[in-house]
Every structure is written in C-alpha cells, then in structure tokens.
C-alpha cells in the first residue's frame, strides 16, 4: 500500500495564451525556506499549445512527523486529496492564492518569482506525496490461479511509487518495461532453443520474472531512499530546524560535484 510521507505540494498553474508572447521553458528556479521550499518555472503543455507557467510550494503537513501521525496534531482540518483539482470558482481561487502566498511567506520562502505566478494562476490545488517501497517479500509477479500459466507483473508505480524529488517516476517505469521485455524475450528464445539436451527442461517463466525483479528493485530502492531523504532535507525540517545545515550541505555538495552525480546516476538507465 502507498505510504503518506507527511509532505504536501501546492500547485499554482497559469495556462499560456496563444495571443501572448510564448514564454521560454529554459529556466527552473528553486527557493528555500524554513519548513518549505518552492519551485517556479515554465513547462511545455503539449504539441501546438502555449507553454504553462507553474509554481510549486512543498511543505510539511502539520499533522505528521515524516510518515508518522503526531500524537497531538495541530487543530486543523485534514487535507482532502484532489479536492481542488478541477476547482474553477473564482472566490475559492482567490482564497487559495492568499493561503499559498501566506504559507510561503511564513516559511521565509522568497516570492519574487513564485508570487506573481500564484497571483495570476488559473487553478491551485494541493496533493500529498505518497510512496511505495520497492522491496517486497511477496515479489513483483504472481501466477493467476486457474489461468493456465498466466502471470501478473508489476512495473512502474505499481511496484515502486517514488517521491518526486529526483524526477524519476516515469524514467524508472520505462526502464522497468524495457527490462521486463528483455527477460520475456530471453524466455521465449530459451523455449525455442535447439541447444537444449533431451533431458534438460527450459527455465520456467517465474525464474525470468524473478531476474527482472532482482535487477530492478535494487536500483529503484536506491533512488527511492535518496529521493525521500532529499524531500525531507529540502524542506529544512519543521520550523526550519535543520535549514542552515541544508543550505550548507547543498552548497558543499554542489561545489564538489556530488549533487550532479546523484542526479545523473539516478537518470542513467540500469537495465
């Protein structure tokens, strides 16, 4: 089952307009605060569509310490997932703008770029960050009962829903699919091989599916841990308890090249 991380993200989205000058997508800016951080950038919206400007505020849920619910949670209403996903009521939008800007300001997040994006946003919504541990005692595949040998196999988020802080969800899902296809190809080639002696039987499908899992769960587990740690570290802790450490850590890791290696290592295919 998916586990709630205790981290939430508010999204402010400003749709592009064809009659306006096209916004460039080259820059993504990040701002740190105490207990939160923000991102502001311009993203492609699809073929022949004007680019979209978005601001993201990543912050800690007051009712949780990490994935654990606090014994004496704050007296606030629990967030409802997707509650504002399709909201289009202007009064609600104005209220959400004010809430998002206040949260950023109280956390000490600079709003020089984030603020204008929030003010002009066409929609604002909030989602919790959930994850699914890639390690599983029951495995990523199972034979379907009374199916004549058919199997169900997990790939992507079904096997390892990753926190978004390294941007590796889709990348790892594609690598899963490629790796699984390779193992199925090997299995089919083994079935049709003429090199098998009469007494030898081909390896079962389960063995190839196990090879797929063994290869992929170690890789995704490593990314899962780094991404989860990065999310907690970037917020700076509740009330910014380790914000100064975070700032010094990121500056040092950037100077010595560790941050770049972590990002490129996660993105490098391992299939």
Image (tube, rainbow, N blue to C red):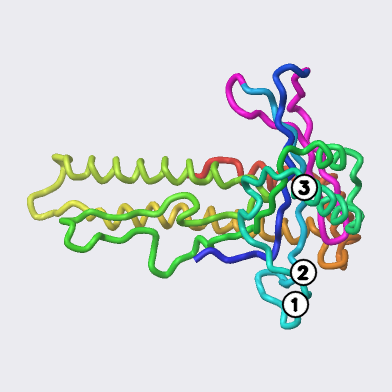
Query: Does 132 sit left or right of 4 as displayed?
Result: left
Front residue of this view, candidates 249 and 104 = 104
Residue annotated with mark 3: 91
Q: Is residue 94 above or below residue 244?
A: above
Magenta stretch: give its range.
21-48
Tell me the distance, in whole angstroms, between the alpha carbons under discs 3 and 2. 25 Å
Front residue of this view, candidates 132 and 225 = 132
Does 186 appear in magenta? no
Q: Which mark is residue 62?
A: 2
Residue at 27% over, 55% down:
151
Q: Which mark is residue 200?
A: none
Secondary element at tag 3:
helix
Which of the marked residues, 1 or 3, is nearer the chain's N terminus? 1
Is the C-beta separation of discs 3 and 2 under 8 Å?
Answer: no
Which of the marked residues, 3 or 2, is nearer the chain's N terminus? 2
Tell me the distance, in whole angstroms, between the alpha carbons under discs 2 and 1. 7 Å
Secondary element at tag 2:
loop
Q: Residues within 10 Å of mark 1 (few under 14, many from 20)?
A: few
Q: Which mark is residue 73?
A: 1
Residue at 68% over, 44% down:
263
Which of the marked residues, 2 or 1, is nearer the chain's N terminus? 2
Q: Residues within 10 Å of mark 3 (few under 14, many from 20)?
A: few
Is the C-beta separation of discs 2 and 1 under 8 Å?
Answer: yes
């Amino acid at each position: 089952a998916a586990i709630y991380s205790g981290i939430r993200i508010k999204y402010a989205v400003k749709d592009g307009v064809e009659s306006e000058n096209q916004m460039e997508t080259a820059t993504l800016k990040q701002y740190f605060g105490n207990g939160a951080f923000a991102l502001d950038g311009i993203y492609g919206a699809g073929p022949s569509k004007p680019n979209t400007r978005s601001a993201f505020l990543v912050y800690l849920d007051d009712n949780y310490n990490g994935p654990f619910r606090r014994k004496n949670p704050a007296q606030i209403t629990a967030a409802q997932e997707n509650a504002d996903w399709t909201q289009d009521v202007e009064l609600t939008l104005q209220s959400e703008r004010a809430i998002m800007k206040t949260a950023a300001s109280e956390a000490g997040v600079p709003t020089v770029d984030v603020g204008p994006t929030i003010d002009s946003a066409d929609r604002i919504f909030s989602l919790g960050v959930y994850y699914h541990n890639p390690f599983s005692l029951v495995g990523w595949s199972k034979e379907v009962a009374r199916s004549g040998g058919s199997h169900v196999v997990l790939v992507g988020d079904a096997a390892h829903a990753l926190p978004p802080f390294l941007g590796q969800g889709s990348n790892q899902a594609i690598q899963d699919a490629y790796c699984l296809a390779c193992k199925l190809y090997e299995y089919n080639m083994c079935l049709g091989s003429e090199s098998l002696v009469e007494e030898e039987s081909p390896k079962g499908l389960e063995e190839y599916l196990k090879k797929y899992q063994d290869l992929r769960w170690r890789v995704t587990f490593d990314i899962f841990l780094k991404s989860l740690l990065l999310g907690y570290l970037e917020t700076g802790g509740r009330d910014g308890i380790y914000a100064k450490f975070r700032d010094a850590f990121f500056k040092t890791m950037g100077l010595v090249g560790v941050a770049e290696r972590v990002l490129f290592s996660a993105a490098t295919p391992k299939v």
